[in-house]
Each structure stands twice: as structure tokens, then as C-alpha cells.
Amino acid sequence: MNNAIRLEVLEEKDLGLINDIYNYYIANSTATFHTGSVTEDDLKEILPVGDSRFRSFLIYFNNEVAGYCYLGRYKPRDAYNRTAEVTIYLKPEYFGLGIGREVLLQIEQKAREVGIVVLMGIITAENEASIKLFERLGYEKCGHFKQVGEKFGRILDVVAYQKLL
């Protein structure tokens, strides 16, 4: 299946392609703690676009946009430039096809190519599918932040996973 999945660098002109995807997660999940819809201008502030190191990618499955992913800055200080937070969002119709696993492997390679050696996954603790994905690919739990978020009237924990590349 991995020949059917490819990542292409996301450019500002592509923000319209992913705006609906992210707004789906805002409205229907706790995968993000945004509580209101975002615009393409908002996405410019959220996603790294045009950076040679911290990059965003469109995810293609059989030549169709299936989602997006990105290597985001872990912290905005040069000392952390060796570390990135990895984030993956798929359209709901692409859940359960093994795309997430292949995307995570490909984004790890993209990270290595630009000298990023530590990847972090920051995940809502109830997001079992994401936790299982990261664990299966060798990420280790390195933090559990209790009751740090609130969405849909519920108090939520966040867990952190990391992998040393």
C-alpha cells in the first residue's frame, strides 16, 4: 500500500484543501483543543508553511488528498531545533486503512533529512487510536498532563510520546 501514499510539501495555496479537514476535528473530536472553526488565515498561524526545516505536507492516497501532517516546532527557541512535534489529520473516510502508520514512517524520514532527531506526539489521552499508532512505531510515553484541557464540557488529560530517531 505504501506506493499509494505520498507526502507533498504543503504550500499556502493549499490551505483551502485542509481547512475543512481541521474544522471537522474541531467540531467532532477532542484531537484538537480548538473550540471554534478556523479560517485559512488562522491556519497560517498554526501550520509551518515555507520553513525549510519545520514543514507541513499534504497526504495523498491513490492521488486523492486524504489529509495533512506536519513537523511543528516543539518550542520557539533555537535550543529545541533538534526536536519537532508531529501531527497527522486524516479525512474520516480514510480512517482504518493503515495510512497513519505509513505517514508517520514517511514523516520520520523527512525529519531525519533536515536533522531533526527527536519527534514528539502530544495526544489527548482518550485518543486511543493515535496512542496505539505511536506506540506501535516505537514512541514511548514520556508525560501525562492531568486535566489540562476542557472541550465539550469535559475535562481532558493530554499525554506526550517521544521517539529518538
Image (spheres, grey):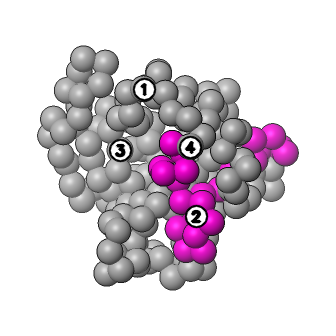
The answer to whether marks 1 and 4 mark residues whose Cβ atoms lie closer than 8 Å is: no
Q: Looking at the picture, does residue 97 appear above or below residue 100?
A: above
Pointer 2 residue: 55
Q: Upstream in the sequence, badge 1 or badge 4?
A: 1
Label 3: state its secondary structure.
Answer: strand
Callout 3, which amino acid?
A: Ile
Query: How far apart in space, not on screen, are marks 4 and 2 (Cα)?
Result: 17 Å
Compute the Cα span from label 1 to label 2. 24 Å
- Indicate left or right for 9 with 136 as reference: right
Q: Is residue 105 left or right of residue 85?
A: right
For mark 3, what is the residue? 123
Residue where numbered disc 1 is placed: 36
- Residue 41 numbered mark, or none: 4
Label 4 secondary element: helix
Residue range (magenta): 42-65
Of all residues, the one furthest to the left in this rendering is: 146
The residue that appears at 39% across and 72% down in the rendered structure is 83
Q: Are marks 2 and 3 in contact (CB under 8 Å)?
A: no
- Classed neighbour count for the residue bearing mark 4: other residues with Cα under 10 Å, few (<14), some (14–19), many (≥20): few
